[in-house]
Image: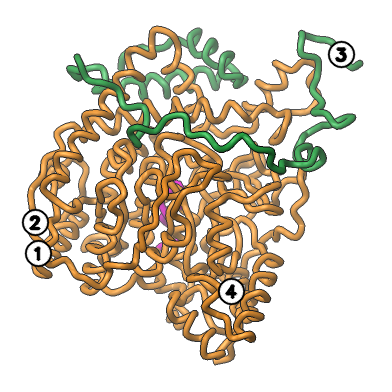
Amino acid sequence: MAQHLTERDVRGIAEYARIGLDEAEVAQMTADLNAIIDSLKPITEYDLAGVEPTFHPIGGLSNVMREDAEEPGFAQEVALANAPAAQDGCFLVPSILGEGGDR
Amino acid sequence: MAAAERAFPAMGVREIRAGLAAREFSAREIAEASLARIRALDGATHAYLETTERLALDQAERIDAAVAAGELSACGPLAGVPVAFKDNMNLAGTHTTCSSAMLANYVSPYTATCVARTIEAGGIPLGKLNMDEFAFGSSTETSAFGPSRNPWDLERVPGGSSGGSAAAVAAGLATVALGSDTGGSIRQPGSFCGTVAVKPTYGVVSRYGVVAFGSSLDQVGPFARSVEDAALACNAIAGRDALDCTSQDVRTDFTANLAEGVRGMRIGVVPAFMEAQGLTSEVKAKVEEAANHLSALGAKLVEVDLPNAQAAMSAYYVLGPCEAFSNLARFDSVRYGYRDPGHKDLGGQYEASRAAGFGPEARRRIMLGSYLLSAGVYDTYYYPAQQVRTLITQDYARAYEQVDCILAPVSPRTAFRFGEVSDPTDMYLSDMFTISINIAGNGGMSMPVGLGADTNLPVGVQLISPQFKDENMLRAAAALETVYGPAPVAPGFAPDAVEPLGRPASLPDAADAVAGVDLPGLAGADGKAGE
């Protein structure tokens, strides 16, 4: 099997995708992803010169807009009902810029 | 038999409507007996994650009031029909977990359009149905609540990702269930469980309120035990919705030509599909048998070529994960979903929450999508996959110059045993005949054609329609139904079962749903679900 990704690559992808993996998971993920990427090979072997891409199955669909009119939305308490933590009508998160501790 | 003992979810739409019209039973009796049947039997199948008793009884009351006023006809085409929904569909006041630990404590503040339309059409909502986590899988084995079991053989998977929907209909625990299909997730479980299973053309049904997986591929559709019931469900859910910009103004009556027969229809067969590696002889024999029946009924069989269809699999495993990576970025442990406790910085909280909230297959697909969309790699896989999509779409367009619909296998094999397919790339082969239909955005359905000669398990054949000509495949399916009959309830769950397989389930009900509190049944640290 071709080595498309090293464990170092996988750590980088995990960081970008915001998924924390431990060492054993990194090793397993590296093996799994290399096998899957291998199976994608046919895509790289097609002669696609001059073929336009299709990004969406319904041709001619673009900028579908509704009228810009006021409509009812969620009340604040409904929007916050599923939040793991909320305070003063806002979503509550830990410090964004590094280890800030509680404030 | 007393009405309370009747197996209403094992009945069809016509039978229920006739009984209501004749006041043989009430909608309240349907709701109560249906929920009682689920609680008595679903311990064996684990199709349901949560029941919706209050909603069922409220709906029944509306229908009974209409019947009392002599206005049953105003109740909609699914009046009194027991219905249930895949758990990636929001229904206000119920958990919508996507069978993931990430959303185990999520309670919907709103209702998906397809769900709302099913209820507006008179359906009695019984509950929410198990699935592969975020629809990533072909067996329901990736559900964080434990797998569903195939009602035909409890040692086997029901297929997936809409496995709970297929199992519920096959076990007679719902008359109609909705599922979603990104690469085969309606059709493959329909084939494994022996139900009619329809993935309409992309754009026929609004996805508003259905948790997104691959937004250029996802489509909602029904499971039922007869073609007519599936077509009635399509009528209820199809059409333009301002809340999904891909939904189209479809006003087709999907039942209109079911009785026409196939005389004069041109039906395509794809020789390369029939010779595909991995296609089992019993499935191949059933597809050939169905072709012969269609021919005998007056259809003209035409060989068509889809030269680029074999590239659909790799195109799908590029496009699907890329779109999933993008769609699953929203699970940020801030607005809803699982939050790993005790973190002092947001980045660490993201990583720990997403690592713990997503199961292994979800993590794989997110990671793969992240890689495939990265600079330099994009041009190697993602862009070519979209070009391949053009070739596949053109293949189908050429084929449909010659035929009105195409007949093909659904799955290369019948239902497999739990754990039998463990390698991710082997599991992906389950969808080898269904994926190209999503890539091109066509309609596709699984039509049950009896049991395979070797495994004695249900086999479905796939009928594939041109875009927005879904009535073509339904017409051919209805013709096959005149030969094979409507799909039966699995023998162990039939109301008159000789060897009943069902056993009681302890199911949570949406009456107890509280945002932030996990739906009971989440698999513990030992990996075993509490059934």
Residue B494: x %, y % from top left: 44, 77
Q: Distance between the residues labelled 4 and 3?
A: 53 Å
Q: What's the residue at 62%, 81% (across, down)?
A: B29
Please name the residue that numbered disc 3 is placed on.
A101
Please name the residue that numbered disc 2 is placed on.
B301
- Taking depth in this image into account, of B91 and B450 the one nearest to the observer is B91
Q: What element carries label 1?
A: helix
- Specify whether disc 4 shares its chain with disc 2: yes
Q: In this view, does B54 lie to the left or right of B250?
A: right
- Specify whether disc 4 shares its chain with disc 3: no
Q: Which mark is residue B295?
A: 1
User: Is B220 above or below relative to B263?
Assistant: above
Q: Distance between the residues labelled 3 and 2?
A: 71 Å
What shade has chain B been given? Answer: orange
- Taking depth in this image into account, of A44 and B455 the one nearest to the observer is A44
Q: Is mark 4 on a helix, strand or loop?
A: helix
Mark 3 vs mark 2: in front: 2
Please name the residue that numbered disc 4 is placed on.
B34
The C terminus of chain B lies in quadrant: bottom right
Disc 2: which chain?
Answer: B
Chain depicted in green: A
User: Is B161 above or below relative to B237?
Assistant: above
Q: What amino acid is at disc 4?
A: Ser
Q: What amino acid is at disc 3?
A: Gly
Q: Over which residues does the magenta segment extend?
A: B153-162
Residue B244: x %, y % from top left: 51, 41
* Mark 2 surroundings: few (<14), some (14-19) or many (≥20) residues within 10 A: some
